[in-house]
Image (spheres, rainbow, N blue to C red):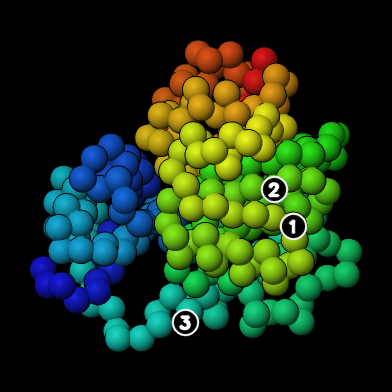
Amino acid sequence: MTDDAVQIIARGPRAQAEAAAQAIDSDPLLEEATYSILEEDEDRDIWRIDAFPTSKEEADGLVAALARFPALRTTVEKLADADWLAMALSGLPPVRAGRFFVYGAHDRGLAPPNTVNLRIEAGAAFGTGHHGTTVGCLLAYDALRKARAFPRVLDVGAGTGVLAIAAARTGSEVALGTDIDAPSVRIAQENAALNRAKARFVHASGLSDRRVRRAAPYDLVFANILAPPLVALAQDIKGALRPGGFAILSGLLRTQERRVLAAYLSRGFRLRRRLHRDAWATLVLQRA
């Protein structure tokens, strides 16, 4: 391995791909790793993992983790010296999720007049609306909003800010997002300005930051992160919610549902709905 930017691609049967993704999630040395998993060929049962390591050590760790699953064919490709993220996003179509229509600058002319249109530019942040976890969160929120209002909303791990912005655009008086990545906070703030949304974003880890505590209790908490931090934050998310408040959790694989759900049920949450998209799951929980 070199220090050049690389993309690691693994292809194989769904069972092996999901098991490999779970192995990556459970490896403490890979907790910051960025990867996606999706179905590439339904007829042939071929699933694909794309990983984008940020260091040689992380790349080596990902390759080693994937090598434990012999049915996966893994390749490492050097990324060209170009803005590959922007190039990839330029080819993504807009996304419809319930009443929400998420699009980038290249599709600004396609926004329908009868939807909540969200222009989201990713930059170096996660959450364009295309990923199964983000779509799942938007669909879950859209369904909840038909029956009740959410004046105060918190988005943990906001990324591009799309979820907090969606809340602000549909009536939430407080829509606060947090992220541990400073560039993501900047991008989310820029997206809020693009959408004329009264959403705020802060650079913070966890829910103990005074700016997060000051706005509590919340009627709804989004947490579209990864399974291990979802489990670790179960008590903090409960504490941030008012009694009867809702949590929409995603960023977890279907194979991780039971583990995450157990952490919240044991703290008095009730499962209200689950959504599946590709290999990903979204859980809608209510604090008792």
Separation (CA) of disc 3 from disc 2: 31 Å
Is 244 placed above or below 74 here?
A: above
Residue 180: x percent and y percent?
43, 51
Q: As shown in the figure, which amino acid type bears the numbered disc 3?
A: Met
Looking at the rendered image, the disc whose residue lies closer to the viewer, 1 or 3, is 1
Left or right side of 238 for 72: left
Say which element carries label 3: helix
In the rendered structure, find residue 175 and report the number of the disc placed on it.
Answer: 2
Residue at 78% in and 38% down: 150
Is 100 placed above or below 20 here?
A: below
Q: 230 or 137: nearer the eye?
A: 230
Residue 128: x percent and y percent?
57, 64
Q: As shown in the figure, which amino acid type bears the numbered disc 1?
A: Lys
Left or right side of 239 for 95: right
Q: Are the residues flagged by discs 2 and 1 in contact, CB closer than 8 Å?
A: yes
* Category of crowding for the residue at label 1, using alpha-carbon neighbours closer than 10 angstroms: few (below 14), some (14–19), many (at least 20): some
Residue at 58% in and 71% down: 121
* Quarter of the figure that contains the N terminus: bottom left
Say which element carries label 2: strand
Left or right side of 147 for 167: left
Q: 123 or 101: nearer the eye?
A: 123
Where does label 3 land, which residue?
A: 87
Separation (CA) of disc 2 from disc 1: 7 Å
Q: As shown in the figure, which amino acid type bears the numbered disc 2?
A: Ala
Whichever of callouts 3 and 2 sits on the residue coming sooner in the sequence is: 3
Whichever of callouts 1 and 3 sits on the residue coming sooner in the sequence is: 3
Is 188 placed above or below 256 here?
A: below
Where does label 1 land, which residue?
A: 198
